[in-house]
Image: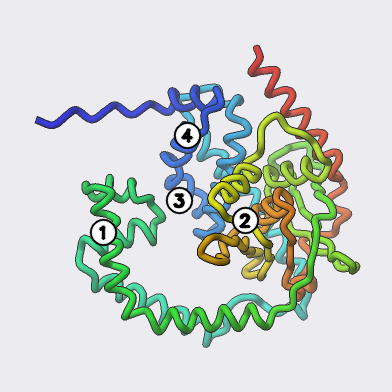
């Protein structure tokens, strides 16, 4: 007779632990409700990538505003509500930018030949996965396509974590010969793009936001300025990322490190270091970036949102480089539309932090 499964802690229990400063309970809360939040965000934004980014911002907002949750047992509904609010705000911002396109701006969307090539590649990958043994196929779909962890895949399939890793290893070995040509093409294209790009070193000159009374309606931008030049590029970012950047630019000391300082510390503890950040491209009104990490096995590029990448660069002192062609991108909005400056944003964040500390003290 098997041992009874231990009872998992409720959302309310995890919320109470998270409020006492424990990190893992908050991470578990977000994991529990991540998939449904991404699904809801995707329905608003129409893009899985944007949906995951929006839910990531919602997770940061939930961590900073956890004291405002009145019913700890309703964390899931509260978290999904934040994700929906972030998604709707992003949707409004994206929609508001489109009419400002200059007529000579070249679309970032693939042309018909590129679209056909992408469709062919996707079909080839799907076909290769479909040819796997059933167990391997299920593991690949859950781990690589749905983004579940090894433990979550094990729970879905009713097998051990070790068995999941074994199936994924076998699947990779079976897929490699079928996809090696595709991988070679991708690597060649990536190297060519990196070699042809002209990079300009930039720094965060300021953070600005709109004057809206309703915090949910406010828009934030970080302004990247060319070092030794006069070119500037405003990029709209989320309020959580903007708040951290504003505090850093204003040299505000905080009682506990923000997630970016923690991430930088973990990278360093692993024997690696962040050597630079690159803002690489603009596609469908979304900017993309990479963080270059020098580790024991050599340099690696990690995909990131520009706001997260820049926060890491500011936290570590790593240089920020921008694909020079992005300076000609159409502006998000006129900078005069963002009258609230860095110092005011930092002061507002400090006030909210003091109020939260006072609530915890009582």
Tell me if residue 25 comes above or below residue 50 in the rendering.
Answer: above
Q: Which residue is mark 2?
A: 273
Observer-nearest residue: 17 or 256?
256
Relative to residue 217, is residue 284 drawn left or right?
Answer: left
Camera-side mark, 3 or 2: 2
Residue at left 39%, top 56%? 146
Q: CA gap, disc 3 to disc 2?
A: 34 Å
Vertical order, 263 against 142 (above or below): above
Q: Which mark is residue 24?
A: 4
Mark closest to the chain's N terminus, 4 or 2:
4
Q: Quadrant for the C terminus, please.
A: top right
Image x and y of residue 127, in percent? 30, 76
Closer mark to the observer between disc 1 and disc 2: 2
Determine which quarter of the picture holds residue 347: top right
- Residue 304 in percent (x, y) is at 60, 59
Quarter in which the N terminus is drawn: top left
Q: Residues within 10 Å of mark 3 (few under 14, many from 20)?
A: some
Horizontally, residue 279 falls left or right of residue 203, namely: left
**What is the C-alpha distance between the residues marked 4 and 2?**
25 Å
């Amino acid at each position: 007779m098997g041992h009874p499964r231990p009872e998992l802690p409720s959302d309310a229990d995890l919320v109470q632990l998270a409020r006492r400063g424990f990190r893992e309970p908050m991470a578990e809360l977000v994991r529990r409700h991540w998939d449904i939040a991404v699904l809801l965000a995707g329905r608003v934004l129409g893009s899985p990538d944007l949906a995951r980014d929006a839910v990531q911002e919602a997770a940061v907002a939930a961590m900073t505003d956890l004291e405002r949750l009145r019913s700890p047992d309703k964390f899931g509904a509260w978290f999904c509500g934040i994700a929906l609010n972030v998604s709707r705000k992003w949707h409004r911002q994206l929609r508001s930018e489109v009419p400002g396109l200059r007529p000579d701006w070249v679309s970032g969307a693939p042309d018909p030949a590129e679209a056909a090539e992408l469709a062919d590649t996707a079909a080839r990958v799907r076909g290769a996965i479909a040819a796997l043994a059933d167990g391997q196929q299920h593991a690949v779909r859950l781990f690589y396509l749905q983004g579940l962890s090894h433990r979550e895949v094990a729970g879905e399939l009713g097998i051990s974590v070790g068995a999941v890793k074994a199936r994924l290893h076998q699947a990779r070995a079976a897929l490699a010969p079928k996809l090696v040509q595709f991988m070679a093409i991708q690597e060649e294209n990536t190297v060519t793009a990196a070699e042809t790009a002209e990079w300009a070193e930039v720094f965060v000159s300021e953070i600005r936001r709109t004057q809206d009374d309703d915090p949910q309606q406010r828009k934030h931008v970080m302004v990247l300025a060319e070092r030794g030049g006069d070119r500037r590029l405003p990029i709209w970012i989320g309020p959580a990322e903007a708040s951290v950047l504003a505090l850093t630019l204003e040299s505000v000391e905080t009682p506990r490190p923000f997630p970016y300082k923690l991430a930088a510390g973990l990278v360093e503890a692993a024997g690696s270091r962040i050597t630079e950040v690159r803002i690489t491209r603009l596609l469908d009104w979304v900017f993309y970036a990479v963080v270059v990490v020098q580790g024991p096995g050599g340099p690696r590029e990690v995909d990131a949102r520009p706001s997260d990448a820049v926060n890491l660069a500011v936290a570590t002192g790593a240089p920020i480089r921008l694909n020079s062609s992005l300076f000609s991108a159409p502006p998000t909005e006129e900078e005069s539309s963002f009258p609230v400056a860095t110092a005011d944003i930092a002061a507002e964040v400090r006030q909210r932090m003091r109020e939260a500390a006072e609530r915890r003290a009582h």
